[in-house]
Image (tube, rainbow, N blue to C red):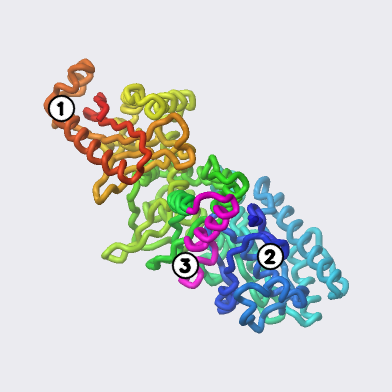
Amino acid sequence: MIKFPYGMADFRQIVSDGYFYVDRTAAIPLLERGATQLFIRPRRFGKSLLLSVLENYYDIARKDAFDDIFGRLAVSRQPTPLRNRYFILRLDFSCVDPTGTPDDVKRSLYDHINVRIANFLRYYHDHGVDLGPMDIHSDNALATIESLLSVTQSAGSPIYLLIDEYDNFANTIMMRPTQDARARYEALVHDEGLLRTVFKVIKASTTATGFERVFITGVSPVVMSDITSGHNIAEDIFFETEFGDLCGFHEAEVKQTLDDIVAHCQLESDRAQDALSLMRTYYNGYCFVPGKDIVVYNPTLCLHFFKQFQHQCTYPRKMLDANLAVDQSKLAYVADIPGGRELILSLVEKGHRVIVADMADRFGLNEMLSDQSKDQSFMASFLYYFGVLTLAGETDQLQLMLKVPNLVMQSLYVKRVQRMLVPNPMLRDEGRWAAQKVYQAGEIAPLCAFVQDHLFSVFKNRDYAQANELTLKTAFLALLYDDILYIMDSVPELDRRYADLTMIIRPDKRHGKIFDVLIEFKFISLKALGLSGEQVRALTSDQLPTLPAVAQALQNGRDQARDYGRRLARKYPRLRLKSFVVVALGFERICSVAA
């Protein structure tokens, strides 16, 4: 039985206690090419575990334990001369409270640094390294750092400094961008600000007898931009090809693990392929290197799936790990930016790409809080760093394309669209109840009535002036979306042809009394109808399908839905399909039929 280290980031405990670990230690020699490095990845992508790997590899106190820790891993076959050469000081800025006044933040940061240095001294003393007396300056942690460097220089070994979540300050303040929060943050990063001063001390101490090596992790380049004013103190390595898979799982690794779980559960061997297909749909698709096809799975989501699958021999009820759900706040931030709602709406459509000339690799808080700077390139770069967009190749003109990586991330967009279109939670519940009628009873009329009565007025608002058939589909998708029961797909490819919206019951939910769903959408403008909005609103429901343009659209939709239905039946033999055609007459009325 495999022991999955869900929520664990202690590398030594993982390897010593026989937990599942995907070996990435072959990258250690490559990381030694730079002395001070910044590595950025989205939340819950294994950055803290990576730091723990480096901590164990370079720690002078663990020299005798090297074979026990790394003996079965790639780096043991050709270890570098720097292994077990350093004292290790590890800071974690997520432990620092960024709220309160600048003095409160200063006290929290100083306390954290002092506690970590005190633990450093105790740890090495317990391992037989007596560094002698030194002062912990409770009111000035920068002086404590200077004292630490003095005693380690006397001991003859430099320090490897590891900093985790270096941008925790900005991330917290950014999600609550009040004037007070902005002033507090700027007080930390201005010329004599606390954070800037801390990194000045670190930079000044990056010598062969001080902090000989520094490795910094975070989610975005925001803080590094603000504290350096455009002058790097760390080499950016987060776009480099060699590190494209440093965090994340390859599909072959995922497949092998699923094979092992299926064998443990004594399930039919084809269950592994079914599980892989499901995981590919929900978790794959992350690419971090421009112009390179290095695609990985989110490791935390994979461990969430693996652990549940092995424990109960069935798939998780919820494919989205709750620890990632807080990324909703990043989409809420973008939704409040001029043009942000339109971007989010368009990204709900599968296959849609955002095209930018280049990624913004440095942008500070002023850019994030200033409306004038938030063009599409900024918004796309921001969403990329937080893992809700990913690289998707290049155009023929060598511009970068970005996309929603997978179905889990798409669910975050859909939930944001739900709140954008129907901000009233009671009304959202009414919309969901109408949506449930579609797949529980095969009735689409209540959902069409809800969209017509409550959403068309939103579409006619100036913010949605370009709303059309795509927006109509997005509205239905937002209300119907259910990734607990369904694999949701907007515009899926079926033998080189495309259906507008399908809801295919997840393999592990097919025992339920619900239907698979296929919907074809048609949009007819009032101009094409030759009628005014008032005239369309005056028509009865029975009169709508008799309009020539509507009748033609309904027939075309039936033909397409039946064709797609046959193709779906070949792909999913156990299909219980309900097909519908939905025709919008401008944003005034909806006519629908079963196909």
Residue drawn at (33%, 25%) of the image: 444
Residue 127: which quarter of the image? bottom right
List the residue tagged with mark 3: 239
Residue drawn at (30%, 35%) of the image: 519
User: Regarding mark 3 in the picture, which secondary structure is present there?
Assistant: loop
List the residue tagged with mark 2: 15
| Disc 3: CA contacts within 10 A as few (<14), some (14-19) or many (>=20) | some
Is residue 170 in view? no
Residue 530 coordinates in the image, percent (x, y): 12, 27
Could you tell me if the residues under marks 3 and 2 are in contact, i.e. CB atoms within 8 Å?
no
Query: Disc 2 and disc 1: Cα gap in Å?
Result: 66 Å
Query: Which span is picked out in magenta?
Result: 240-269
User: Regarding mark 1 in the picture, which secondary structure is present there?
Assistant: helix
List the residue tagged with mark 1: 551
Q: Nearer the viewer, mark 2 or mark 1?
A: 2
The amino acid type found where label 2 is placed reads Val
> Which is nearer the N-term, disc 1 or disc 3?
3
> Which is nearer the N-term, disc 2 or disc 1?
2
Query: Disc 1 and disc 3: Cα gap in Å?
Result: 53 Å
Q: Nearer the viewer, mark 1 or mark 3?
A: 1
